[in-house]
Image (cartoon, grey):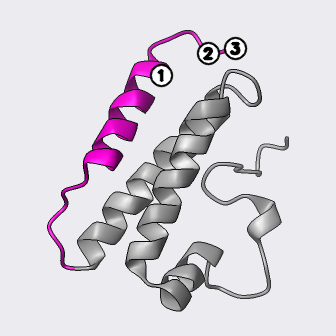
């Protein structure tokens, strides 16, 4: 991977000729609630596989999705309260202290 590539925050396979990111288009098309659920599922997937696929990068991606879910809660005007998301954040935090290959 070159120094300019960022597989966590701006993966090149999501780059397009438009200025809007895919996840923002999803939010418009499906609503913030659906995208929050999508983010939680993706975070879960990355935690599930991190030891067997991309190690630390997968934990960083899981963290990115959790942060995006919290951001979407804030932009919706709703109070943040999500037990599933809290559990995922705690799980990611516990995995980051383990030695990741």
Is disc 2 in contact with disc 1, using a CB cutoff of under 8 Å? yes
- For image coordinates 71% across by 88% down, the residue present is 18
Q: Nearer the viewer, residue 14 or 32?
A: 32
Which of the 4 quarters of the picture holds residue 89? Answer: top left
Q: Secondary structure at mark 2?
A: loop
Q: Specify the quadrant that holds the C terminus.
A: top right
Which mark, residue 100?
A: 2
Q: Residues within 10 Å of mark 1 (few under 14, many from 20)?
A: few
Vertical comparison of 76 with 98: above or below: below
Is disc 3 in contact with disc 2, using a CB cutoff of under 8 Å? yes
Q: Position of residue 96 (x, y in %)?
A: 47, 22
Mark closest to the chain's N terminus, 1 or 3:
1
The stretch in magenta equals 77-101
Q: Position of residue 47 (x, y in %)?
A: 56, 34
Q: Along the horizontal axis of the image, is 68 left or right of 47?
A: left
- For image coordinates 79% across by 62% down, the residue present is 12
Q: Along the horizontal axis of the image, is 28 left or right of 78?
A: right
Q: Residues within 10 Å of mark 3 (few under 14, many from 20)?
A: few
Q: Secondary structure at mark 1?
A: helix
Vertical comparison of 9 with 54: above or below: below
Vertical comparison of 58 with 61: above or below: above
* 32 falls in the magenta region: no
- For image coordinates 55% across by 90% down, the residue present is 29
Residue, disc 1 = 96
For this orientation, the residue located farthest to the right is: 1
Residue, disc 3 = 101
Which mark, residue 66?
A: none
For the residues marked 1 and 3, what is the alpha-carbon distance in whole angstroms? 11 Å
Q: Along the horizontal axis of the image, is 72 left or right of 46?
A: left
Vertical comparison of 68 with 29: above or below: above
For the residues marked 3 and 2, what is the alpha-carbon distance in whole angstroms? 4 Å
């Amino acid at each position: 991977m070159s120094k300019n590539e960022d597989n966590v925050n701006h993966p090149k396979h999501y780059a397009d000729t438009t200025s809007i990111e895919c996840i923002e288009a999803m939010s418009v098309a499906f609503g913030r609630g659906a995208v929050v659920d999508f983010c939680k599922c993706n975070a879960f997937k990355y935690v599930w596989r991190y030891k067997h696929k991309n190690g630390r990068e997968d934990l960083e991606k899981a963290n990115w999705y959790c942060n995006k879910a919290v951001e979407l809660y804030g932009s919706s005007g709703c109070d943040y309260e999500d037990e599933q998301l809290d559990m995922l954040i705690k799980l990611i935090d516990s995995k980051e202290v383990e030695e990741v290959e």
